[in-house]
Image (cartoon, rainbow, N blue to C red):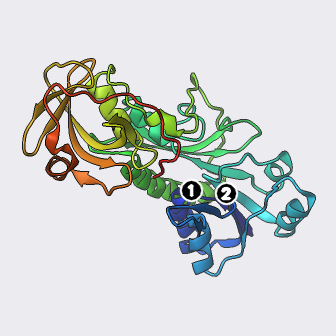
Amino acid sequence: MSIVFFGTPWFSVPALAELLKAKEDVRLVITQSDKVGGRGHKIISPPIKTFALEKGLTVLQPDNIRSEDFIKIVRETQPEFIVVVAYGKILPVELLNMPLKGCINVHASLLPKYRGAAPIQWAIINGETVTGVTTMMMDEGLDTGDILMQKKVPIKEEDNALSLSERLANEGANLLIETISGIRKGTIIPTPQEGEPTYAPIIKKGDGKINWRLSAREIHNRVRGLYPWPSAFTHLKGKLLKILKTEVLEGSGEPGTIVRKGDKELIVGTGKGLIGLLELQIEGKKAVTVREFLNGMGRNLKIGERFNDGKVNESHSS
């Protein structure tokens, strides 16, 4: 029996890799269109496309997944399962009802918490210490389908969205294989979601703007949750400054104001507590440690100098 796989970013790659390792018959890989990006305005293919082509799989990038022609192509594979892992578009009911044993989605949260596009980022931003992965039977709602399996995953103090995404992707891939096996054996019974749902809307560039009146812990969590994109940012001397890594410290100081500076430290006041800046990136430059920053652009910074809110520079990219 065949599987049709929908996915786009790197997060979906481990799941496809585990399906192939398990000798599953993946007939089609569906992903979103290539995009133009980066400083050289190059054509960038979705990571799942690159991986699938390396493995000799058939890849489709339909502009319209609701078109009769596309739905016919999927139907002709006679799928046992459709598997969706971070595809990025809502599937039409014709596809949801097509596979013999259902459409399985791998979602990076413990549903019904953090339904939506950015569960990993918002879990960190909101200060969660535990998250997880869920496999569910898809329906027409936004992550509202019946739960198949779940696994809890701790959020470590040093985690950012990138490191947590890597762990959840691998845990989700393993859970997907267990789920498919359990459905075939009849040992997994879909269970309706219980509890009050929360939501994780898509991340926008403007979400990275630092409000220095928040507590040091809240700013620290935002820095972690928004790395590597769009990154938390502020403005310094008219330039956009990304804050890539921080630490929470005891003490107090005027929000957004430099309260301590040394050879290897740059400490800023917040609405509650202090925050140490450990890794930064001025627009147009590479990421540097705080020591490197203080030896460069930050050399002339003075205690009492203030980072400003500035305006979102829509041209800045990851």
Secondary structure at badge 2 equals strand
Choose top left, top right, bottom left or bottom right for residue 9. bottom right
- Determine whether 134 is above or below 48 in the image: above
Q: Quadrant of the N terminus?
A: bottom right
Query: Does the image show residue 164?
Result: yes
**Residue marked by disc 2:** 83
Query: Does the image show residue 129?
Result: no
10 displayed left or right of 100: left
> Percent from the top left, x then y, of residue 116?
60, 37
**Residue marked by disc 1:** 176
- Report the residue at 64% width, 49% height from top: 105
6 displayed left or right of 197: right
> Percent from the top left, x then y, of residue 124?
39, 36
Tag 1 near tag 2, CB within 8 Å: yes
Alpha-carbon span between mark 1 and mark 2: 9 Å
Q: Indicate the amino acid at tag 2.
A: Val
Q: Indicate the amino acid at tag 1.
A: Leu
Residue that protrudes farthest toward the left in the picture: 263
Mark 1: few/some/many CA within 10 Å (<14, 14-19, 20+): many
- Determine whether 122 is above or below 298 in the image: above
- Determine whether 174 is above or below 131 in the image: below
Residue 133 tag number: none
Choose top left, top right, bottom left or bottom right for residue 273. top left
Q: Tell which of 253 and 18 is nearer to you.
A: 253
* Sequence order check, earlier mark of 1 and 2: 2
